[in-house]
Amino acid sequence: MKKIIMGVAAVVSLIFAAQVEARGFDGFYVGAKAGYNDSSTSGSLVSKVGRPFLGVEAGYNWIMNDRILLGANVWGDDHKQTVTGRDYGVDLKVGGLKDNMLYYAKLGVAQTHPGSRPHYGLGAENVFDRHWGAVIEYAYDSTPKGGITYTNNKFMVGVNYHF
């Protein structure tokens, strides 16, 4: 959790230092990603499973004051052989823009087994073409249920198409 707080603090500091030159992040986007989910349970049932996975996302971004980005997105990850299975969720995003780069933090809700849980993320996206961006992201969620704590640590890379 400390790493997440430190990462969010770094992203917030970038927001205030950023100057935007790229407007490619504004508006609707869809994307695909591949990653690795390091999942575990603790408490009355202890297990650890790591698996590669594929996922999708779609969202909308608003650029505010030429340097701050606010966004919302929905996503789905297919890591069915891990402790939580196929997940989907919704996130709010805040980020800072500098040149063709977006640095962001996400906060939202993940859903499926074992139920709803807070979802956090940190990432960066580089727009390398008028419509295309390359993404790298880390996401985390954890929840206790029935004496067991379910945790996901997801490391992802992907591409987004901006309309």
Image: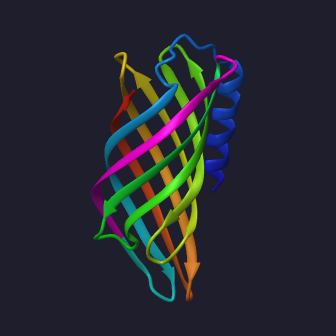
Above or below, 137 relative to 62: below
Residue at 51% x, 17% y: name it: 23
Above or below, 89 relative to 32: below
Horizontal placement of 24 versus 106: left or right?
Answer: left
Residue 84 among those drawn in magenta: no
Horizontal placement of 56 versus 25: left or right?
Answer: left
Considering every residue shown, the one lying at the far top of the view is 21
Residue 58 among those drawn in magenta: yes
Above or below, 12 relative to 35: above
Which of the image's four quarters has the C terminus?
top left
**Residue 136 location, x and y as percent?**
41, 37
The quadrant in which residue 96 appears is top right
The part of the chain drawn in magenta is 49-66
Residue at 51% x, 75% y: name it: 115
Which of the image's four quarters has the N terminus?
bottom right
Return the residue nearer the eye: 38 or 112.
Answer: 112
**Residue 83 location, x and y as percent?**
38, 73
**Residue 155 location, x and y as percent?**
40, 48
Residue at 72% x, 23% y: name it: 16
**For the image shown, how many numbered marks are present on the structure?**
0
Above or below, 23 relative to 48: above
Horizontal placement of 31 versus 44: left or right?
Answer: left
The quadrant in which residue 13 appears is top right
> How is the structure coloured here?
rainbow
Q: Which is the main secondary structure of the residues drawn in magenta?
A: strand
**Residue 52 location, x and y as percent?**
27, 56
